[in-house]
Amino acid sequence: MVEATVSDRAISGLGSSLRGRIIRPADGDYDEARRVWNGMIDRRPALIVRPAVAADVVAAVNFARDNALIVSVRSGGHNVAGNSVCDGGMAIDFSEMKAISVDPQARTATAEPGVKWGEFDAATQAHGLATTGGTNTDTGIGGLTTGGGIGWLGGKYGLALDNLLSADVVTADGRLIRVSAEENQDLFWAVRGGGGNFGIVTSFTYRLHSVGPLLAGLLAHPAAEAKKVLTFYKEWERGMPDELRCYPALLTNPEAGPVVAVAVCYNGPMEKGEQVLAPLRTFGPPVMDVIGPMPYTAVQAMLDDAFPPGNNYYVRGPMVREISDELIDVLVDQFAQATSPLSALVLQQLGGAMARGETAFPHRAASYNLVIAGGWEPTDDSARHIAWVRGVSDAVAPYTTGASYVNELGQEAEEGADQIKAAYGASYDRLASIKAKYDPQNLFRHNQNIKPAV
């Protein structure tokens, strides 16, 4: 671990200038403050800054730049690579910036970066409104939005970043600027898909949509039927309406054991949804079917229990061109070799409105994001579970686009610069030029890093 060389006096001076606070290794809440969702991550920042207002972020960025400190940024802390916490530098933790303001007439919501999707959804659903979010309530809005934002409403309303109307960003030179379709358009394009490379977002304003109860839930068949079920699904999904998004998965249910499951969400009239889903629900038939009307907040919580905080996680997220017979064979075979009942293979459906949009997100043509999720208890040996994830990733490679979802990449030291560059696809060169304009010294590099163009 590289230790910061900043004096205690300088850090105390920073602390006295903040409305928020600084947490240091000697403080009683330091270990809790540095802990993130993935139990594998064990990093020790020299100082954790918890800003209370945007001016605190400006002060922290100026301090880090002037003292050559590496900077990490934490919104919800759900990022599997653990990029929200660094060793020996400054971690900016937005746990105390959680304001949400909803304008039901304008159908917009403005939220600070410490807000998690469960909190955001509760605030907007109080007005019968919502926007595309993630698929776990404890995911932060910040990292998910700037990297993409695949979610249940995406087929009809696009990615989370497609619904971002404006943002306030602290740049590497300590300016707080507004980005939107009218202001600083180049940076607005870049933060919608380029991650945290260009600055620190202190406020997000989203477009909202009328969202009432949805027809959603999960059905499952025994894993022995996986090939048959996925082959049926492959044919059934053709011509699927934008209102419906599905996540086929191979996982272990605590009661039923290994299963092939399909989680669904229909964002439209219930009667029409029942008609659309009827072939899926009657095929087999399933041994489990818990599909029914539910509020959007419950839909967002459907997968929470599958990925609880504190377990160890190792994840890959390649983009898939299409579900083919060959890919089905590989997935079924690889799941049979899974090393933990907490591991899963999940196909997150894209398409619909997510296939359209003029942002830096480069995967509009992909049909699915394959989440290869290795999960295990912290006391278990990690090596064999990591090896399983890597093995699955290698096996499915011929059926992917060759690129991964940036929100599910690991550290650059492991992934390699080529994999990170591929995750930004055709957007990379333009992103690198914008990076050179706004962060030429690469202050914001504790992420899936885009090097400034030279």
Image (spheres, helix red, strand yellow):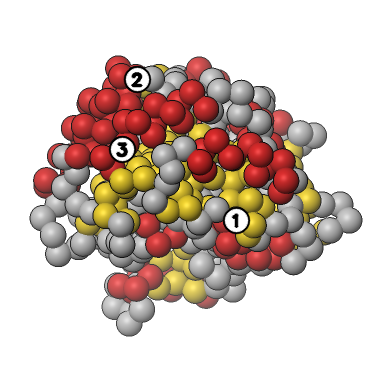
Q: Nearer the viewer, mark 2 or mark 3?
A: 3
Circle 3 sits in a helix, a strand or a loop, which is it? helix
| Kind of residue at badge 3 | Glu
Q: How many marks?
A: 3
Q: Residue at horizontal 55%, vertical 70%?
A: 96
Closer to us: 325 or 350 = 325
Name the side, left or right, on which 170 lies relative to 336.
Answer: right
- Percent of width and height locating residue 432: 49, 25
Q: Residue at horizontal 82%, vertical 52%?
A: 107
Q: Residues within 10 Å of mark 2 (few under 14, many from 20)?
A: few
| Kind of residue at badge 1 | Gly
Q: Earlier in the sequence, mark 1 or mark 2?
A: 1
Circle 1 sits in a helix, a strand or a loop, which is it? strand
Q: Earlier in the sequence, mark 1 or mark 3?
A: 3
Q: Quick one: which residue is furthest to the right in this view? A: 105
Which residue is disc 2 drawn over? 325
Name the side, left or right, on which 85 lies relative to 282.
Answer: left
Circle 2 sits in a helix, a strand or a loop, which is it? helix
Q: Residues within 10 Å of mark 1 (few under 14, many from 20)?
A: some
- Percent of width and height locating residue 340: 19, 52
| Kind of residue at badge 2 | Asp
Q: Residue at horizontal 60%, vertical 56%?
A: 292
The reply to whether callout 2 and callout 3 are in contact (CB within 8 Å) is: no
Quadrant assignment, res 371? top left
Q: Quadrant of the C terminus?
A: top left
Which residue is disc 3 drawn over? 225
Q: Quadrant of the N terminus?
A: bottom left
Of the numbered discs in the image, which one, if any, rests on residue 292? 1
- Percent of width and height locating residue 433: 54, 23
